[in-house]
Amino acid sequence: MVCQNRCDVGLLCVFVIVMASGCSRSPVDGRPTLVPVTGTVLYKQQPIEGATVLLVPTDHEFAAAGKTDASGTFQLRTFDPDDGAAPGKFTVTVKKFEFLYPPGGGEIEKQLLPVKYGNPTSSGLTATVVEGEENDLTFELND
C-alpha cells in the first residue's frame, strides 16, 4: 500500500513537471516570430468562399496560406492553424478550383477565378506584414 501511494505521488510529480515545462516552451528553433494576419477576398465585389490565399515571401523563406469562408474572410497560417505570417513582403496568389472527373478516368482542375491570380508573377497582388500593426488584407479580384 505504501509503495502504491509513493508511486502515485511520483507519477503525479512527473506529470506536473512535464505540464509546467510544456507551458513555457521557447519558440521552435528556426521558426520566425509570427503575427496574426486576416483578410478578405472579393471577386467582382462579392465575397468568395473556398478560395486559397497564398503569400509567397520576397524577402525571407516562410510562406503563409489561408482559406476563405462564406464571407470571403481568411486567417493565415505558417506552421499551425491561424498562427499568422512572418513579417515581411509577399507576392500573393488566390485560387479557387473544383475537380472534374471525366468519363474514362483522370482528374481535371477547373479554375473558378481568373488564372492570372493563381500565379505570383502575374497576379499583381502584394502584401506587407508588419509586426505590431493590424494586418488585415483585402484583395479585390476582377476579370
Image (spheres, grey):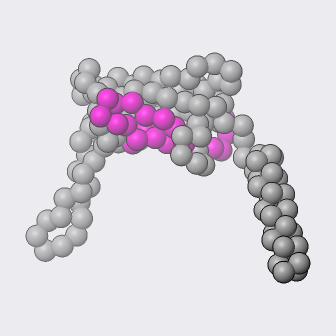
Residue visible at 34% across and 36% down? Answer: 69
Magenta span contains residue 56 = yes
The C terminus appears in which quarter of the rendering?
top left
Residue visible at 34% across and 40% down? Answer: 51
Residue 59 is drawn in which quadrant? top right
Task: Look at the picture and state if 97 lies above or below 33.
Answer: below
Percent position (x, y) of residue 99?
24, 57
Magenta span contains residue 61 = yes
Query: Is 110 on the left-hand or right-hand side of 27?
Result: left
Percent position (x, y) of residue 37?
55, 30
Query: Is 117 on the left-hand or right-hand side of 59?
Result: left
Residue bounds of the magenta highlight:
52-77
The N terminus appears in which quarter of the rendering?
bottom right
Query: Is 107 on the left-hand or right-hand side of 16?
Result: left
Mark yes or no: residue 129 visible.
yes
Task: Look at the picture and state if 119 lies above or below 21.
Answer: above
Percent position (x, y) of residue 24?
80, 46
Percent position (x, y) of residue 41?
36, 28
